Amino acid sequence: MNRTSVVERHTKETKIFLEINIDGKGSYDITTGIPFLDHMLELFAKHGLFDLKITANGDTDVDDHHTVEDIGMCLGDAINNALGDKVGINRYGFFLLPMDEALAEVAIDLSGRPFVVFNTKWQQEKIKTFDTSLVEEFWRGFGTRALANIHINVKSGKDAHHVCEAIFKAAARALDEASSIDPRRSDIPSTKGTLTE
């Protein structure tokens, strides 16, 4: 089974190339033009055991918003494409991850029905120049295009960097579980017979 995908997005705001292997070893080569986002995506690849390559050029001279959201969308598209018909997957994934004083809970259902719940209260609006509100935009873009139901709940955390790390690592581990193949299953894990709508 070769669960890989390549996605390219070219608009007046961003140019993105993204390649993922769901069944990878956690290798990465990521350059988005936003150093903090690079760091979060490297964590995502490493802890989810996804091989991930991303190059992005966006209008970051205006704002980071378009680049962050569009990369989330491209990553969602790539995951959805790589999953194919979703035969044999676990479908559900959950992880509770501590990062010093921060604790993030992420639950994922690769249901085919996108819905994102994001609960956190930021103690800081910025991490250096990175706007913390963009973390929610990233995961909304991802969930919509991955056709996934995602609940992200930050249970505790004061340092915004720690909170972000906890979210991205927990999401990686939850997605790894949800996308993994259950050797006992030879069908789609739904009584409807589909996870595409």
Image (cartoon, grey):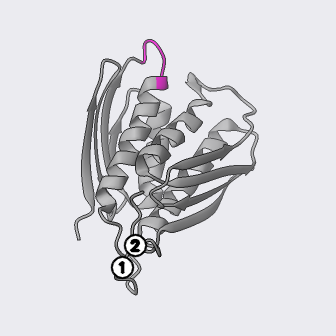
Q: Quadrant of the C terminus?
A: bottom left
Q: SS at mark 1? A: loop
Residue 21 is tagged as: none
- At label 2, counting other C-alpha atoms closer than 10 Å, the crowd grade (few under 14, some 14-19, many 20 or more) is few
- At label 1, counting other C-alpha atoms closer than 10 Å, the crowd grade (few under 14, some 14-19, many 20 or more) is few
Query: Residue at 62% of width from left, 30% of height from top?
Result: 133
Query: Residue at 62% of width from left, 53% of height from top?
Result: 151
Q: SS at mark 2? A: loop
**Distance (Cα) linking label 2 and label 1:** 8 Å
Q: Main secondary structure of the magenta part?
A: loop
Query: Residue at 39% of width from left, 83% of height from top?
Result: 185
Residue that numbered label 1 is attached to: 187
The verdict on residue 63 being magenta is yes
Query: Residue at 49% of width from left, 54% of height from top?
Result: 113
The verdict on residue 163 being magenta is no
Amino acid type at image mark 2 = Gly
Residue that numbered label 2 is attached to: 193
Judge by depth and name the residue closer to the eye, 145 or 155. Answer: 145
Q: Which residues make up the magenta segment?
A: 60-65
Residue 17 rendering spot, x and y as whole percentages: 26, 37
Q: Residue lying farthest top? A: 62
Report if the CB atoms under discs 2 and 1 are less than 8 Å apart: yes
Confirm whether residue 128 shows in the render: yes
Amino acid type at image mark 1 = Asp
Against 171, residue 140 (above or below) is above
Q: Quadrant of the N terminus?
A: bottom left
Q: Residue lying farthest bottom? A: 184
